[in-house]
C-alpha cells in the first residue's frame, strides 16, 4: 500500500509556541483536522489491508524562509495527523512518522503513506 496527499501547512495558531487561549487553539485544530480529513478523503486514501504500522513520510515545506524547529512542526501537524487517521478509519497510534523539513518554500505538507513490507519513501 502506498498513497500520497498534499496538505496545507499547519496554521501558526497550532504551533506549541503560540500563546492562545485553549478554546481558540481548539477551534483552529478542529478546522485543520477537518481540512486534512477532507483532502485525504478526496485523494481516495484507502485503509491499509494489514493491521501493522503505517509509515508517514512527512515533508514540510514552510510558507517562508523563517527558521522553524522540526519538533514544533511535528506538534503543529498533530491535528492533520488525526485527520489522516480519521480518513483512513484507523487509530493514529499505528503511525510511524518520518518527518523532514525541506529547504524549499511552499506552505504545504506532502505526506506519503506506506504500510506492510514497504517502508522506503518513494
Image: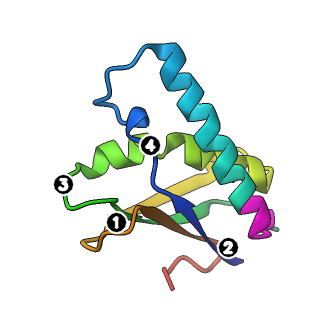
Magenta residues (range): 40-47
Which mark's residue is nearer the viewer, 3 or 2? 3
Q: Is residue 2 left or right of residue 108?
A: right
Q: How busy is the neighbourhood of tag 3: few (under 14 within 10 Å), some, or many (20 plus)?
A: few
CB atoms at circles 1 and 3 under 8 Å apart? no
C-alpha span from label 1 to label 2: 21 Å
C-alpha span from label 1 to label 4: 18 Å
> Circle 3 sits on which residue?
66
Residue at point 55% right, 24% down?
Answer: 26
Residue at point 58% right, 26% down?
Answer: 27
7 vs 73, nearest the viewer: 7
Circle 3: element type: loop
CB atoms at circles 3 and 4 under 8 Å apart? no
Badge 1 or badge 4: first in the primary sequence: 4
Q: Which mark is residue 56?
A: none
Residue 51 is at least partly visible in this image: no
Determine if the magenta segment contains residue 110. no
Kindly report the secondary structure that dominates the magenta region of the rendered protein: loop
Q: Residue furthest front?
A: 64
Q: Is residue 40 left or right of residue 121?
A: right
Amino acid at each position: 500500500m502506498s498513497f500520497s496527499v498534499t496538505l496545507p501547512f499547519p496554521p501558526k495558531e497550532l504551533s506549541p509556541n503560540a500563546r492562545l487561549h485553549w478554546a481558540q487553539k481548539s477551534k483552529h485544530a478542529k478546522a485543520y483536522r477537518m481540512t486534512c480529513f477532507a483532502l485525504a478523503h478526496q485523494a481516495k486514501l484507502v485503509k491499509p489491508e494489514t493491521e501493522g504500522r503505517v509509515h508517514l513520510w512527512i515533508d514540510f515545506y514552510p510558507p517562508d524562509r523563517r527558521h522553524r524547529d522540526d519538533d514544533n512542526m511535528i506538534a503543529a501537524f498533530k491535528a492533520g495527523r488525526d485527520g489522516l487517521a480519521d480518513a483512513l478509519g484507523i487509530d493514529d497510534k499505528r503511525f510511524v512518522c518520518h518527518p523532514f523539513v525541506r529547504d524549499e518554500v511552499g506552505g504545504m505538507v506532502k505526506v506519503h503513506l506506506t504500510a506492510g513490507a514497504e517502508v522506503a519513501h518513494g
